[in-house]
Image: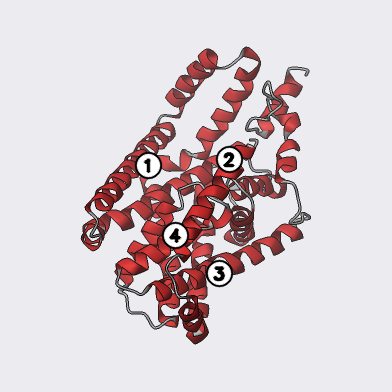
Amino acid sequence: MKIKRWQIYLGVLISAVFLFLAFRKVDFTMVWFHLKSAKWVWVVLGLVLYFLGVIVRAWRWKILLNPLKSISVKKLFPVVCVGYMGNNIYPARAGEFLRAFILKQKDDVSFSGSLASIVVERLFDGITILALVLFNLGRLVRLITDPVMSRNIQLATWVVSAVFGVLLVVFLLMAIFPQKARTVASWLTQHLLPKKWRAKADSIIDKFIDGVSVLRSWHQVLLVLALSFLVWVLEAGLYFGVMKALGLNLAFIDLLLVEGVVNLVLLVPAMPGGLGTFDAATKFMLELFQQGAEQALGFALILRVALWLPITALGAFYFVKEGFSLSTDIGQLKTDYQEETPVGPENEPLLVTEETKEQDEHNGK
């Protein structure tokens, strides 16, 4: 996948607009006062809960990967950290690619199957976040005095819910009826792709279906869903820690609503780490709960640093430990899979798996 220059410019523009919204009409002297007065021990306690959530994420990923290969939580935790680092400093959520890449390098897990597990993981994250918002949607609507904004937020929430619902149904059908899914996928590749790509595309789709096979078990689905809620509740513990550090007084259920809305806003394409979108959404939500603009911005800034810096530093440590550097060209890593990848007319590699290479060798290519 090649990142277009216009996509980068669009991300910069969106981030700039949201940063303007976050920092306008604020007394920065008061913001600095709140930051200096913060009780940072609460932030540290919040970070402990947050990293427990990261461990739970590794546990959840282990469950999703079990149909492909059994890997311990201890081995998956560093890979999850690298994924966070990648999403925080590289464009286009490159951290997800890095996770699959490193897992292929270290444990020889199918690249496309690993990506499928990550897609399922993100799907459950989306469902959990939407549940947090929908559960409190009535309260959110009452807090917003602007009727137009209130209607738009309700509409956006239900539209996103419908999209995630459709995706969940599709993945469940793929998992429950794998042969029918392969038949439908094969028909699509035969009718939509050039002949030279069809066999390789079928191989990729085949492994992708294997990657979602954990959804065949309702017991596993419920376990993954429960772990997803636990992940986000633990992350809300960091929101709670920042709140206590600044001496604010919000109910934990309010913080879950803030967390849900902020993460929905992060779906808007922007610069890595949700620069601008995260800050403006967090400040907006705190102001809805009758917090002053300066306290709200202080909350957003501390939370941003706490969410970004420790996990990014830890991910970078593990990334370097794997033999890479922060200046590594992610696009070049993708190119390293070129020999396993069908190449398009503009020399842009498509998604690849190790099965692609095996099939080429079998065909004498």
* Residue 7 image label: 2
* Disc 3 crowd, CA 10 A, few/some/many (<14, 14-19, 20+): few
| Residue type at numbered disc 2 | Gln
Where residue 20 sits in the image (x, y, percent)?
A: 48, 59
Q: Nearer the viewer, mark 3 or mark 2?
A: 2
Q: Is residue 114 visible?
A: no
The residue pinned by badge 3 equals 305
Image-based side of 145 in relation to 299, left or right: left
- Could you tell me if the residues under marks 1 and 4 are in contact, i.e. CB atoms within 8 Å? no
Number of disc labels: 4
N-term-proximal mark, 1 vs 4: 4
Q: Residue at x 64, y 60 (%)?
A: 78
| Residue type at numbered disc 3 | Val
Q: Nearer the viewer, mark 4 or mark 2?
A: 4
Where residue 203 sits in the image (x, y, percent)?
A: 60, 26
Its colouring scheme is secondary structure
Mark 3 to mark 2 CA distance (whole Å): 25 Å
| Residue type at numbered disc 1 | Phe
Q: Nearer the viewer, mark 3 or mark 4?
A: 4
| Residue type at numbered disc 4 | Leu
Image-based side of 108 in relation to 20, left or right: right
Q: Determine whether the residue tagged by mark 4 lies in a helix, strand or loop.
A: helix
The residue pinned by badge 4 equals 21
N-term-proximal mark, 3 vs 2: 2
N-term-proximal mark, 4 vs 2: 2
Where residue 216 sits in the image (x, y, percent)?
A: 41, 39
The residue pinned by badge 1 equals 164
Asked if 253 appears above or below 320 in the picture, the reply is below
